[in-house]
Image: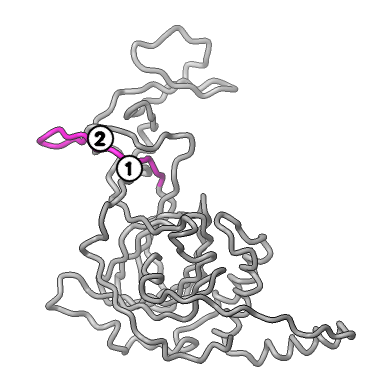
């Protein structure tokens, strides 16, 4: 989530190939027996090594590999990584306006990273992105609200619009996004997956109760490789003044124009919507869209501290 790199900037060691075995069936059986004896977190580590072999920005693992990794994460429990809700990381701090979030670093190499965010009640990880990355998030315990967005395609960035407020001001560098998820999740539940351009690439986590989420990022954040974590403000679509737009829906086309209406060959079904800076959204879809604006500095409400991982050892 961008915080991992600052807390632990370590690269993984290169792995040497094992000598070839002539009996492939024997080797397969031996590997299966070895895999069954592994701890759950070791299984996760081994699976990540297999799935994230490319380690390149924007490269999504094949669907079968996505499913394999998700199946490992789906069955993981807090005790598999040495966590219990009674640990001090999860205690509410009545004297703090911004509850501190604890990050437990498990592993990071050039291809992937593994880590756990421990959130006390009301803890928040602000809205941020995952450029060119495939991310798995497994809620280990507790209840968390997740709100995520994907960019609306074919809409220009660096849009200028006027904010609806007592003092009209111009806001630049905003971009239209569509809500992907806006729900509470309670463990046990399956791992969620986001992709470079789908699945809710920008997301925000809010702890409804004390909770822990295990994150797997492939590849991890890396400024030199263009994978920089960016934080955003999200503003409702209606926060920006706009123009009434008309959507004319024909049998084979979907066009929109501004008043006054031209003579049209299309069907008479008409939908009203709002257009901002030439970007039009039907009226009934306004609530599912928002304008995202980059934050120039790290959010003031983000307080993250690192702590040592004390769960089962991961053997590299």
Specify the label residue 32 is tagged with. Answer: none
Mark 1 = which residue?
291
The image quadrant that residue 272 belongs to is top left
Q: Residue at x 61, y 83 (%)?
A: 43
Observer-nearest of 60 and 96? 60
With respect to residue 198, does 66 lie above or below?
Answer: below
Observer-nearest of 296 and 13? 13
How many marks the image carries: the answer is: 2
| Callout 1 secondary element | strand
* First to last magenta residue range: 163-178
Residue most toward the front? 224
Q: Is residue 302 left or right of residue 128?
A: left
Q: Of the residues under marks 1 and 2, which one precedes in the sequence?
A: 2
The image quadrant that residue 169 belongs to is top left
Mark 2 = which residue?
240
Look at the image and tell me in which quarter the N terminus lies: bottom left
Q: Is disc 1 in contact with disc 2, using a CB cutoff of under 8 Å?
A: yes
Residue most toward the left? 166
x and y, in percent, of residue 134 in the image = 53, 61
x and y, in percent, of residue 56 in the image = 58, 59
């Amino acid at each position: 989530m961008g915080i991992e790199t600052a807390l632990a900037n370590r690269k993984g060691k290169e792995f040497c190939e094992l000598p070839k075995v002539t009996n492939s069936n024997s080797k397969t059986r031996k590997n299966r027996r070895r895999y069954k004896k592994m701890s759950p977190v070791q299984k996760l580590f081994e699976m990540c090594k297999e799935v994230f072999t490319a380690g390149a920005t924007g490269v999504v693992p094949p669907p079968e590999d996505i499913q394999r990794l998700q199946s490992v994460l789906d069955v993981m429990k807090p005790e598999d990584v040495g966590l219990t809700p009674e640990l001090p990381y999860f205690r509410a701090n009545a004297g703090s306006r911004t509850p501190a979030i604890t990050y437990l670093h498990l592993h990071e190499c050039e291809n992937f990273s593994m880590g756990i965010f421990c959130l006390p009640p009301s803890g928040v990880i602000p809205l941020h992105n995952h450029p060119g990355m495939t991310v798995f998030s497994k809620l280990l315990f507790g209840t968390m609200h997740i709100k995520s967005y994907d960019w609306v395609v074919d809409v220009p960035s660096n849009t200028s619009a006027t904010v609806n407020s007592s003092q009209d001001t111009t806001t630049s560098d905003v971009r239209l996004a569509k809500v992907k998820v806006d729900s509470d999740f309670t463990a046990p539940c399956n791992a969620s997956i986001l992709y470079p351009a789908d699945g809710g690439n920008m997301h925000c986590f809010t702890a409804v109760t004390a909770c822990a989420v295990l994150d797997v990022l492939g590849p991890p954040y890396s400024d030199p490789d263009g994978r920089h974590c960016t934080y955003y403000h999200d503003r409702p679509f209606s926060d920006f003044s706009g123009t009434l737009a008309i959507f004319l829906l024909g049998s084979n086309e979907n066009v929109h124009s501004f008043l006054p209406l031209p003579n049209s060959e299309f069907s008479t079904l008409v939908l009203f919507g709002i257009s901002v800076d030439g970007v039009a959204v039907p009226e009934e879809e306004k609530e599912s869209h928002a304008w995202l604006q980059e934050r120039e500095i790290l959010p003031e409400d983000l307080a993250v501290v690192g702590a040592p991982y004390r769960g089962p050892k991961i053997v590299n």
